[in-house]
Amino acid sequence: MERIVILSGAGLSAESGLDTFRDAGKLWAQYRIEDVATPEAFARDPALVHRFYNMRRAQAASARPNPAHRALARLQADWPGEVTLVTQNVDGLLEAAGASPIHMHGALSRAICAACSYRWDAPAEMSPDDPCPACTAPATRPDIVWFGEMPHEMERILSAIHSCDLFAAIGTSGQVYPAAGFVEEARRSGAETAELNLTNSDMSRAFDAHITGPASNIVPAWVEALLQPKR
Ligand code: APR
């Protein structure tokens, strides 16, 4: 086995204190997606959308990587083949642990200008009147992929999935496409598939193997087993 692709979701960062979306009482129980996470919401009430992401940016800034982030960084560094980490998470905890993930849903730490597409490091607080540092238009938004928008780096991600030997999904509910379809893509390409999650998810049936438990326990153990020399 040489090439590994790992898709992660909010469950990876749950034990760092960051809320998931669909678990009971979590983010989508407190906010409506159509109020804070669509281009239409931003056009209607940019101040509300900025407040939501300013809050999440502050929470992410005070969170620390947990043993699951650190184990994935170790796997990426020590695996003799290639490990592509694809995350739906917009926090920077994988990077803080030393890993290099693809942020398919964007990053709280980045801003983008809706007028000229210039990108820069987001300030702690963004507001609708902020001018773009490149073109000065007051059209700045968080560099977050909202519902109805195309995730980042899809070509690179699909090419890694189509040539991988093992595809694993960690801490994701499998309710949001295109990420939810990656396991089927990987299966069609002949990869082994494994799901690591606190419980069974909507896409559990699509996986060959299941490891159940909190990410901070099961991910380090799984990585340890992968890195164990085979006899
Ligand atoms: N360890 C492992 N898994 C966990 C843990 C934990 N400690 N806590 C929760 N989980 C699992 C849940 O069982 C669930 O399957 O994490 C998953 C979280 O699912 P969601 O809240 O739906 O998060 P995610 O799959 O990342 O959402 C996908 O939806 O709203 C969007 O853009 C947002 O990127 C996000 C996308």
Image (cartoon, rainbow, N blue to C red):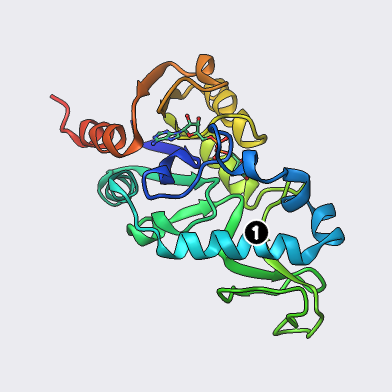
Total numbered labels = 1
**Quarter of the image with the N terminus in it:** top left
Residue at image point 73% right, 80% down: 130
Secondary structure under the numbered disc 1 in the rendered image: helix
Farthest-out residue, left: 231
Q: Specify whether tag 1 is near ligand 1 (CB below 8 Å).
A: no
Residue 63 found in image quarter:
bottom left
Residue 79 found in image quarter:
top left
Q: Give the amino acid type for the residue marked by disc 1 in the picture.
A: Phe
- Establish if 130 lies above or below 153: below
Relative image position of residue 203 (x, y in whole percent): 56, 21
Relative image position of residue 59 (x, y in whole percent): 48, 60
Residue at image mark 1: 52
- Establish if 1 lies above or below 152: above
Depth order, front residue of 26/60: 26
Relative image position of residue 11 (x, y in whole percent): 45, 38
**Quarter of the image with the C terminus in it:** top left
Residue 230 found in image quarter:
top left
- Establish if 112 lies above or below 64: below
Residue at image point 43% right, 31% down: 168
- Establish if 217 lies above or below 148: above
**Is residue 128 found left or right of 190 in the rendered image?**
right
Depth order, front residue of 201/223: 201
**Is residue 214 found left or right of 183 in the rendered image?**
left
**Is residue 171 found left or right of 104 in the rendered image?**
left
Residue at image point 47% right, 19% down: 200
Neighbor class of circle 1 (other Cα within 10 Å; few <14, some 14-19, many 20+) is some
Depth order, front residue of 100/79: 100
Relative image position of residue 123 (x, y in whole percent): 58, 76
Residue at image point 54% right, 54% down: 90
